[in-house]
Amino acid sequence: MTDFTSVKNKVAIVTGASDGLGKAIAMCYAENGMKVVVSDIDAEKGHSVVEEIKASGGEASFIKTDVSKEEDVKELIDFAIETYGRLDGIVNNAGISAESRPTHEYSLAEFDKLTSIDLKGVFLGMKFGVEAILKSKASGGFVVNVASLAGLLGNSSMAIYTSAKHGVVGLTKSAALDYAPYNITVNAICPGTIKTSIWRNAPEEVIQQYAKLLSPNGRLGDPKEVAHLALFLASDLARYISGSAITVDAGSSAGKLTPTQWSHPEILD
Ligand SMILES: NC(=O)c1ccc[n+]([C@@H]2O[C@H](COP(=O)([O-])OP(=O)(O)OC[C@H]3O[C@@H](n4cnc5c(N)ncnc54)[C@H](O)[C@@H]3O)[C@@H](O)[C@H]2O)c1
């Protein structure tokens, strides 16, 4: 079967689903017949995501969760089981970024805050989420961790974010080996520069400048372009893919960009 009907009725949690990539993933899952637990620290926006999903005929529920708190994550998993009776997958997406500055200028408080969400939050989602997926005896369970290109490459002035995202890729690879015998896949998505709320207040010319600088195809990614990979990884089409850190970046991590000399530029006319 080469379509996505295998995801129908699967129950999935998406963290950080009130906005940005998490919202796009939650909407895409629901559009394809999955039952989605929308979870986020922002309850107001989270409820409106659920309303949007329901208005288009999908099934979803909201619970407020701070992924850096063990009790909250336990409650999130219990809520999913109480609401839908089982859990097939979890998308650990919630994350924050930090201001850019050289490594020695970050405070320990900044390091602790960022890693408590971007790394500990993913660990907690996996710890309690996988346990529930195992208990659900899911035939085709999945974990999708949203890392970043910063999980694969170093970045100047971004040491703490980069270290947390490298940690997410490490968690992903190790857990993939732990759960392969139980038919649970564990993968990381590594987005490049995607147009989410972080760009909301930026003037269009600044966005264009960044797009030229950071993306070989000259534009920022659309959150839906990340959601489509998350959908594929949730489906039975991806059962032999595990432990992978997959980029969604228009090729920006493939190598260095150098100016291209076309011998026959007229073919572009
Ligand atoms: N947008 C990009 O270009 C990009 C690139 C690489 C990786 N990422 C990663 O993608 C993920 C989503 O980023 P985004 O761009 O959609 O950001 P976003 O700010 O648009 O959305 C993040 C969501 O996470 C929620 N959140 C923040 N702290 C939380 C907490 N403690 N507990 C629960 N929810 C919390 C926010 O309320 C928000 O709804 C992050 O992990 C981010 O690091 C984004």
Image (tube, rainbow, N blue to C red):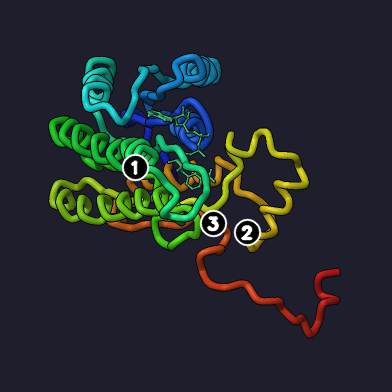
In what element is the residue under mark 1?
A: helix
Question: Can you say whether 24 is above or below 243 in the image?
Answer: above
Q: Which of the numbered marks, if any, corresponds to residue 108? A: 1
Residue of label 2: 215
User: As shown in the figure, which amino acid type bears the numbered disc 2?
Assistant: Ser
Distance of label 2 from label 3 (alpha carbons): 7 Å
Direction from residue 193 to residue 166 in the image, left or right = left
Question: Can you say whether 173 is above or below 87 in the image?
Answer: below
Question: Of marks 2 and 1, which one's residue comes earlier in the chain?
Answer: 1
Q: Residues within 10 Å of mark 3 (few under 14, many from 20)?
A: many
Assign the C terminus to one quadrant of the image.
bottom right
Q: Ligand 1 closer than 8 Å to the CB at disc 3?
A: no
Front residue of 180/256: it is 256
Identify which residue is drawn at 46% across, 21% down: 58
Residue of label 3: 249
Question: Can you say whether 251 is above or below 79 in the image?
Answer: below
> Given this view, does label 2 or label 1 mark the residue nearer the observer?
1
Residue furthest to the bottom in view is 263
Front residue of 263/117: it is 117
User: As shown in the figure, which amino acid type bears the numbered disc 1?
Assistant: Leu
